[in-house]
Amino acid sequence: MSGLEELRVLDLSDGFAGAFASKLFADYGADVIAVEPPAGNPVRRHGPFPGDWPRGDGVLWKYLGTNKRSITLAVGTATGQRIFRAMVEQANVIIESFAPGTMDSLGLGFAHLQGIKRRLIVTSITPYGQSGPRAAWKATNLTSFASGGQMSLTGEPDREPLVNGGYKAECQAGLNAFAASGIAAQNADSYEIPQHIDISMQECMAASLELYLPWVAYLDKDISKRKGNMLSAVVGVYPAKEGYVGVHVMPRNWPYFAKAIGRPELADDPRFRDVPSRLAHNDELEAIIHEWAGSDTAENLYRKVASQRAPVSFAHTMGDLLASPQLTAREFFHTVEDPEAGELTLPGPPFRMSDTEWSAGLAPQLGEHNAEFYCEEMGMTRGHLARLRAAGVV
């Protein structure tokens, strides 16, 4: 049993965060219905596309849409709102990413929907949350990464801040939305507690700043300075013959690291014997580690030191990840046969549970499940569905 197979999630969101949250529900067994506008979720239009040509759905949707059902519905229309209210009766969780107040203006806000089904979870994902002076502001993944404080910590100290790769702000928001919605759905079922979950991407970023905010709050000291790739000689990123190695030597690791790089005598060298000594002779030690790192490729260096408890890794490229023996052994990647793109290799789950199954799957085509859902489950006739399609409602 998956543990989530009795949940129905209606996903009205139109960005990475909501789609990622509902993907996790779907991949772990919930019945997720992507309620898309007739033109489709904008995520479908993110490339790359099969054959590098923008027709069909982009690969981002093929990743985020797995195991979902797709129906089309114009919830901005009066007819669409009536249909959606009927859908809510069988739903457990609704995920949306409209600007604050939009759902209320459509008659689909949390208070309205509670009148249809009391034990309901509505999860709203926005850049700045449902309240506050910036609640109505729009944002992108990059600006959310910046507004949450993460960007101020990334990059070289004498240069501009850098954005991290990928959809980090939206991914964090999606993970938090999934976790909060899952807990709330359990409480709604067990204790009949409905909830409106307010996810702010800015707050998701600010909540993961480790010790930087507490230092300011409790000690009135700002330690959030960009330090680039070299915090010290033993905490940094070094260029190898090919690629880069990351080194993070804690005090207890120092003797193992010295031995692993072929310089066991450094462990007892008065210049490097303890933390203060290493910091006092940081430039000398950095030169020694640079010499070691430049002696071989990053992957070979990693293989040599891996068994010696040396805290070293190499910066994996996408090709390295696909070829990783660790990820291969854990069957992280999976292959699906997509009707548009052919064979696709997609990432697996971000976490695993002993008694809850995860499954690979395909992303649906736009409106693929309209007839199944509207006619077989809601009782519409084919003629009624055709009239709704002609009117632009579905």
Image (spheres, rainbow, N blue to C red):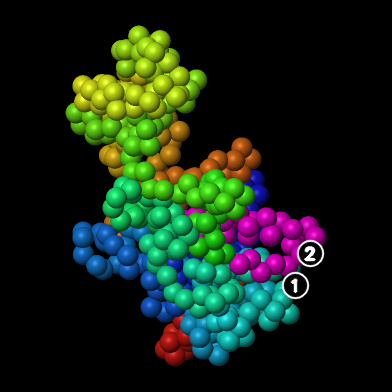
Q: Where, by quadrant of the figure, is residue 188 drawn? A: bottom right
Q: CA distance from mark 2 to mark 1?
A: 8 Å
User: At numbered mark 1, what does the secondary structure look like: helix, strand or loop?
Assistant: loop
Report the side of 87 relative to 193 (left or right): left
Residue 134 point in image, percent of width and height: 51, 75
Q: From where the camera sits, is residue 237 visible?
A: yes
Q: Is residue 177 magenta?
A: yes
Q: Which mark is residue 192?
A: 2
Residue 128 point in image, percent of width and height: 52, 69
- Three-letter code for the amino acid on which mark 2 is drawn: Glu
User: Along the line of sight, which residue is nearer the eye, 77 or 184?
Assistant: 184
Q: Residue at x 50, y 20 (%)?
A: 252
How many labels were placed on the picture?
A: 2
Report the side of 226 relative to 382 (left or right): left
- Three-letter code for the amino acid on which mark 1 is drawn: Arg
Answer whether labels 2 and 1 touch (C-beta < 8 Å).
yes
Q: Residue at x 62, y 49 (%)?
A: 218
User: At numbered mark 2, what does the secondary structure look like: helix, strand or loop?
Assistant: loop
- Look at the image and give the residue range highlighted in magenta: 169-198
Report the side of 394 relative to 338 (left or right): right
Report the side of 29 relative to 51 (left or right): right
Q: Which mark is residue 118?
A: 1
Q: Residue at x 24, y 67 (%)?
A: 54
* Predominant secondary structure, magenta span: helix
Q: Where, by quadrant of the figure, is residue 110 drawn? A: bottom right
